[in-house]
Amino acid sequence: MSETRPCDQLPPVRGSYTYGAALRDLVWFRAGGAAEVLFRPADADDLAAFLAARPAGIQVHVIGVGSNLLVREGGIPGVVIRLPAAFGTVHIEGTRIRAGAAALDAQVSRKAADAGLAGLEFLRGVPGTIGGALKMNAGCYGSEIKDIFVEATAVDGSGNKHKLATADMGFVYRKSGVPDDFIFVEAVFEGVKDDPAAVRARMEELLARREASQPIGSKTGGSTFKNPPGRMAWQLIEEAGCKGLRHGGAQVSELHANFLINTGDATAADIEALGEEVRARVKEKFDIELEWEIKRVGVP
């Protein structure tokens, strides 16, 4: 008799399960393994019901558009949750914007500009979704999610829903302090009324700066390492002689040293090994431990 695994006993859902789902086409690096099960919930109630009824011992991981994610070749055991388009709605409510967790950061920024709301321009330069941005207090060019945050809704690992105010989020640099099992489903942000043309002009200026300084047309995962206190990661990496460094099909970007790129046939192992080589060289030269900003998941 064959052994029954927990993933063979998943509860009925209104969304969909895909067994053995390839993830490499869902992450920006275009590398890595599969999910044992990929679950796309129909809505927040479907997600909560699944989490409440899932068998004990089932690991759960959440992915957005995979913009800062490295999935190892051995894949991800358990259930990978990816919120579908139903979680991607964006609504203007006066000077506030209500956005689903699957909404692209850039989409939220554009909607704000169209409505003449300033303060969200920086999101145009943040790859990924609102859910991921909340988890990591995403930001660029001097602004962060915490600067515009009003409230968020999350579902915990037992299926309970939570409303979170700023004090509940525990925002610090590139991180929030919410429990690891919280899955964001929606957030509300505050903007400031401004001329739509002026907002769009600032947004396009930020985008032009990003395009000129980052390898956004490459298969990459965004900023690889967090900036250490008082230092810039890209500068440390450059001064440690790592610009252009290669490992297999992975390379440190020649345009921006804090970006790793898949030059075409890199494996997740190539990319991770290159990152560790960069960390080792920076540690040797400056005695500074670079901390990964890219999330690495799965089995090697």
Image: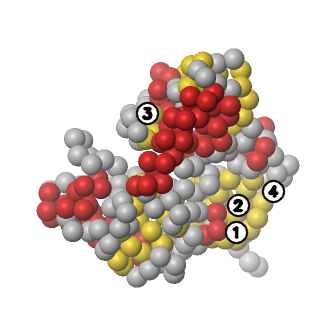
The x and y percentages for residue 23 are 63, 67
Residue at image position (44%, 48%) is: 209
Q: Position of residue 200 (x, y in %)?
A: 59, 35
Q: Alpha-carbon distance for marks 1 and 3?
A: 36 Å
Between disc 4 and disc 3, the foreground one is 3
Compare residues 174 and 119 and report the one nearer the observer: 119
What's the mark number on residue 16? Answer: 4
Identified at 72% across, 42% down, the residue is 88
Contact, mark 1 vs mark 2 (Cβ under 8 Å): yes
Provide the residue designation for mark 3.
Answer: 143
For residue 150, side relative to residue 41 (left or right): left
Crowding at dot 2, Cα within 10 Å, few <14 / some 14-19 / many 20+, comes out as many
| Lower sequence index among marks 1 and 3 | 1
Q: Earlier in the sequence, mark 3 or mark 2?
A: 2
How far apart marks 1 and 2 lie (CA) works out to 6 Å
Q: CA distance from mark 2 to mark 4?
A: 8 Å
Question: 10 Å neighbourhood of mark 1: few (<14), some, or many (≥20)?
Answer: some
Colour treatment of the image: secondary structure
Q: Nearer the viewer, residue 203 or 50?
A: 203
* Marks 3, 2: nearer the viewer: 3
- Locate residue 287: give its quadrant: bottom left
Q: Give the residue number, with chain letter if any, for mark 2.
A: 38
Say what amino acid the circle numbered 4 marks.
Ser
Which residue, given by chain and number where applicable, does mark 1 sit on? 21
Residue lying at 61% horizontally and 70% vertically, measured from the top left: 24
Category of crowding for the residue at label 4, using alpha-carbon neighbours closer than 10 angstroms: few (below 14), some (14–19), many (at least 20): few
Q: Earlier in the sequence, mark 1 or mark 4?
A: 4
State how far apart marks 4 and 3 are (Cα).
Answer: 37 Å
Q: Is residue 285 left or right of residue 260?
A: left
Tell me if label 1 and label 4 are in contact, CB under 8 Å.
no
